[in-house]
Amino acid sequence: MNSQDFQLFGEIVNSRSGLVLTEEKIYLLESRLVPLARRRGLENLEALAEEVRRYKDDRLLEEITEAMTTNETFFFRDTKPFDTFRDVVLPQLLKARATKKTLRIWTAACSTGQEPYSIAMLLKEEAAKMAGWRVEIMATDISQEVLEKAKAGLYSQFEVQRGLPIQLLMKHFQQVGEMWQIDSSIRAMVKFQPKNLLEDLGSLGQFDVVFCRNVLIYFDQPTKSKVLTQVHKILADDGALFLGGAETVLGICDSFKPVDGQRGVYTSVNGGLMAAAS
Amino acid sequence: MPSCLIVDDSKVVRMVARRILEDLSFGILEAEDGKGALNACLEKMPDVILLDWNMPVMNGIDFLRTLRNSENGEQPVVIFCTTENDMAHIREAISAGANEYIMKPFDRAIIEAKFSQVGVL
């Protein structure tokens, strides 16, 4: 791919999603955009770039952005954050919200839905402690295409075997031909909505827990800072922010501080999760 | 080094599983059917058994029931690994005492995920 074409695709994706495409990500452009080019009857990425320059078709720019921002995910990814949510964060919030009995959780960039559904299954397992509670799991992604898949809750045999314990497959899934579909009772616990993290997040309302894992790594420093500042505004002061293993707030946003002893978990400097429990 | 007994009548499947598990630092033993697996367990009980369902001589589910009913106090982790990919087989395996269940075909990511879930990785 010539450098002008690479720059063109890079600018489209960056301006629409904040994702930064560095030179070493050329392989990603090829693996993700070649199928898109073929679907449009174009031979290669040069032809796709030409099409972009000639028509400046908004739908095509959207498809390019979607193809580049769709990321692989799986159920209970990394395990530990979900244990921390169940064993550390949830007990504190159940105590702190005992009168209101409401809990709002947001998974930003939810991709094909495995993360919000993992949270939903986990909460269902804890249902005995939450009788009478109103719990909302909001799941957003920039890509309409992945949200449609997420809403259907249909997964391949490969997808249900990566991270999902067999007991939970038996309990919460039905076999539909070659696929596995998560039960409607779990699907009903999650509200899916398109959202670009670069836009104003205020319309989503206030949350008690935010999962924003493996998203910031794709952004440049100013974008990371902008997103985290917005997240801080919509997260309760005694709430929890979960980031991916390779992500941090340190040096990027001073409104958050790490929660002691809980890697990847952050809370507001105005109060904080642990402070609320003590 | 933890040990894993791979029980499968397909030489190719045993070879693929061996490569993945050796890479994950398991010492590997192999058996071609349930009978061979029982003999291997009598000799030295492995930490984990990766178990096929359909095999000649003694199939996987009969082997598992015999193993779980044995007087021997040591009970390894058993992970089924089979082309039987329907809910009825999964339920039967779990109620017979399997700890996890892999539907073939598998890859390294699935093996790693399942072995982690049962706490042997």
Image: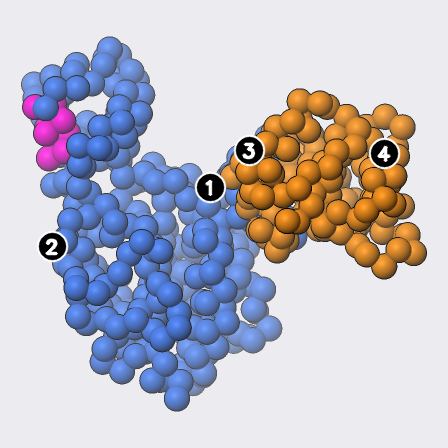
Chain colours: A blue, B orange
Kind of residue indicated by mark 4: Gly
Q: Amino acid at mark 3?
A: Asp
Residue A19 horizontal/vertical position (percent): 19, 43
Badge 3 element: loop
Please tell me which residue is depicted at 27% across the width and 30% down the height of the picture.
Answer: A28
Q: Which residue is mark 2?
A: A222
Closer to the camera: disc 3 or disc 4?
A: 4
Q: Nearer the viewer, mark 3 or mark 2?
A: 3
Whether the residues at callouts 1 and 4 have beta carbons within 8 Å, the answer is no
Subunit of label 2 = A
Residue A183 at least partly seen: no
Do marks 3 and 1 both belong to one polypeptide chain? no
* Vertical relation: B14 (above or below) A117: above
> Residues under labels 1 and 4: Cα distance?
44 Å
Distance (Cα) linking label 3 and label 4: 25 Å
Residue highlighted by disc 4: B36
Which residue shows up at 15% across the image and 59% down it? A225
- Name the residue type under label 1: Ala
